[in-house]
Image (cartoon, rainbow, N blue to C red):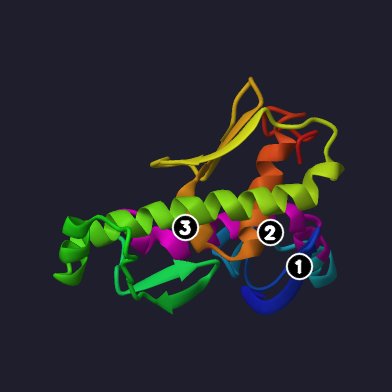
Amino acid sequence: MQSLIYKEKLKFLDFESVFEIEVFFRMRKTLSIQLLNFNKIRVLCPVYISIEQLKEKVRSKSSWIIKKSNLLRIKSQIAENRNNLDISQILYLGKKYPVEFIAKNNFDKLKIKELKNGNPQLLKDVLKRWYKLEAQKIIMQRYDFFKNKFLKKPTIIKVKEQKKRWGTCNSNGNIYFNWRIIMAPIEIVDYLLIHELSHLENPNHSINFW
């Protein structure tokens, strides 16, 4: 038997996904699992392992697979918005919505004129400020939901500009999030929040952390 393709439903905590598993049987001593994208896995498997043993090995790695899948899903969903906001529609909690800018009476008259003339950079600035406010609001709402499950509490939770990271937790107990996570589905926001809150007790990615 040279190869095998099957589907497997994996679950970790409240996250559940169906993955397509592509298996290659080789003359090797160990089994290797590679996540190709957020719903496809490649397994390099020793020829002496049975199908049931193979499936059990994959299931035993559910937590690792789900966590890596979630991070890949975030990147795929918001990569297009990293450097260039689309002012015709917004990606908000995993769904796209059309954008309509309405200037209030107390809004700066010059900016109202620019908005009406369709100034792209001003529209992007307005949209970015809105994203940051929404991200802070949603994250704090989700924190209120999860906070009693953690012994240690953060000093602050703040949304800011972060080029490469989705979230960070420093030794002072300060947690920072990339405002762009508000573009991802709420379960991904929850995952990132739980991840950083867990760092309050385990600052690294050791076995104890996971």
Percent coordinates x, y for residue 185 in the rendering: 59, 66
Q: Horizontal placement of 55 versus 160: left or right? A: right
Instruction: Residue type at mark 1: give it.
Output: Leu
Residue indicated by mark 1: 10
Q: Residues within 10 Å of mark 1 (few under 14, many from 20)?
A: some
Instruction: Residue type at mark 2: give it.
Output: Ile
**Secondary-structure class at tag 3:** helix
Main SS of the magenta segment?
A: helix
Residue 83 position (above or below residue 8): above
Magenta stretch, residue numbers: 56-84
Q: Give 82 or 33, whichever is nearer the viewer.
A: 82
The mark total stands at: 3
Percent coordinates x, y for residue 111 in the rendering: 21, 58
Spatial CA span between label 3 and label 2 = 14 Å
Q: Residues within 10 Å of mark 2 (few under 14, many from 20)?
A: many
Instruction: Residue type at mark 3: give it.
Output: Lys
**Secondary-structure class at tag 1:** strand
Residue indicated by mark 3: 75
Residue indicated by mark 2: 66
Label 3 or label 2, whichever comes before in sequence order: 2
Q: Are marks 1 and 2 in contact (CB under 8 Å)?
A: yes
